[in-house]
Image: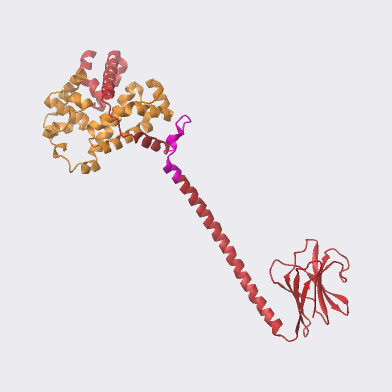
Amino acid sequence: MNSRITYSEQELVALLQQRNEKAFGYLYDNYSGALYGIVNSIVTDKEIANDVLQNVFINIWRKIESYDATKGRLFTWMLNIARNASIDEVRSKGFRDSQKNQSLSETVNIPGAITGPAVDDVGLKKVLSKLKGELRVLVDMSYFQGFTHEEISKALNIPLGTVKTRIRSALTQLRTMI
Amino acid sequence: MNTQEYISGGIVESYVLGLASDEERSEFEKMCTQYPEVLAARNAFELALEKQAMENAIAPAPGLKNKIFEQISSAGKVVSMDMAPVRKMNWLKYAAAACLILLAGSVYLNISLTKKNKSLENNYNTTVAELGDLKKDFQVLQQNPEVKMASMKGMEASPASFATVYWDTASQDVYLMINNMPKPASDQQYQLWAFLDGQPIDMGLIEITEKPLQLYRLKKARAAQAFAITLEKRDRSDISKPGGQVYVMGKL
């Protein structure tokens, strides 16, 4: 956080869209930690998590034109880039190979295993840990592992409609917890 | 429409966290433009989420920022002047540039050396061929007992000059070899003279060529006791009598 200047979000976005590297430096100084926290909650390997964060910032730099302020805050936009990049990495073949020698409990397809991993450490996952049993599994699969409602429905053998309403319910609870 | 019910249904969180379906997304975006309370709910959750994430920030690897800046800078973007220059001191980039320059230099040098080599080779081949011709000529001249030779040494005007006349007394042909003589100015030229009883006889004008050890064939001589070369003006009217300085002279 060594930037002396502070920007309003509007100014920051305008400068980034002009490819202002100083503004990008400011963005990194202010948000890399928060985004790394998100990446880290999905990609547990520190080295890979850093690689993912690097790609996240490069994608932010390249895609800043497509950011639309009417659809949400800049941070929300960046957060979703970070989440998607992390999930893509976890689902990539290379990552799965690198994780093969690690704990079996991290294999994502086994529903029972999902409650197992060390979720209750930091950030959103800490909040998530406050959700009750099944709701927590649903949010974890949906948000942190990127499964679609259909995939969750199949994996947990719960009707699709039920998955949807329960996730909604979990998210509503999540709001009051944050 | 009951917006409170809509808001509390989990759509706000679902949308912000990127979990909503495309259909839900476009509906929610429409709702945000129509109902300020929906937009406010979205903003509130976004801010809470951001705050929560900021509080749980984890510092990434220390070198990561530089790595990222190296990548975005090398992507050919316009460099803004207010960036700290030290960040662009990316040795790899400079090394690559240096390599390119070295490569270009090397390629250029290669081409020019190859060219030079080629032209030297051509020169060499020509010279060897000429030397071969010359040797033949010499052999003819030297082995022929009828051929007389006059070594002409440098006179006062040009002490370092040296030339040789071969005179075939049988055929009366006269050959001149310029061993070493200065190149005349453009309005001057050398002229060979034969001396008989002290009288100069014009043997012809010499057009000096660049070729070394060139053998010039001049006018036939019926009789001579000595030979000499003078430096003459090109445009003089009477070339039958020497007017300029004697450069070399030698007796048979």
Q: Position of residue B2 (x, y in %)?
A: 22, 12
Q: Nearer the viewer, residue A166 or A100?
A: A100
Q: Is residue B245 visible?
A: yes
Q: Quadrant of the C terminus of chain B?
A: bottom right
Tell how many labels: 0
When the figure is inspected, residue A1 is found, relative to residue B134, above or below; the finding is above
Q: Quadrant of the N terminus of chain B?
A: top left
User: Could you tell whether A12 is left or right of A128 in the image?
Assistant: right
Image quadrant where residue B139 sits: bottom right
When the figure is inspected, residue B31 is found, relative to residue B192, above or below; the finding is above
Query: Any idea which chain is the red one in this picture?
Result: B
Image quadrant where residue B147 sits: bottom right
Q: How is the image coloured?
A: by chain
When the figure is inspected, residue B10 is found, relative to residue A58, above or below; the finding is above
User: Could you tell whether B53 is left or right of A7 in the image?
Assistant: left
Residue A35 covered by magenta stretch: no
- In the image, which residues are magenta? B75-95
Q: Nearer the viewer, residue B7 or B201?
A: B201
Outermost residue on the bottom side: it is B145
Residue at the spot x=34%, y=35% of the render? B64
Residue B88 covered by magenta stretch: yes
Query: Any idea which chain is the orange one in this picture?
Result: A
Residue at the spot x=44%, y=35% of the render? B86
Q: Is residue A161 visible?
A: no
Q: Position of residue A174 (x, y in %)?
A: 19, 21
Image quadrant where residue A136 sits: top left
Residue at the spot x=88%, y=76% of the render? B199
Q: Position of residue B127 (x, y in %)?
A: 63, 70
User: Could you tell whether B184 is left or right of A26 in the image?
Assistant: right
Q: Nearer the viewer, residue A52 or B66?
A: B66
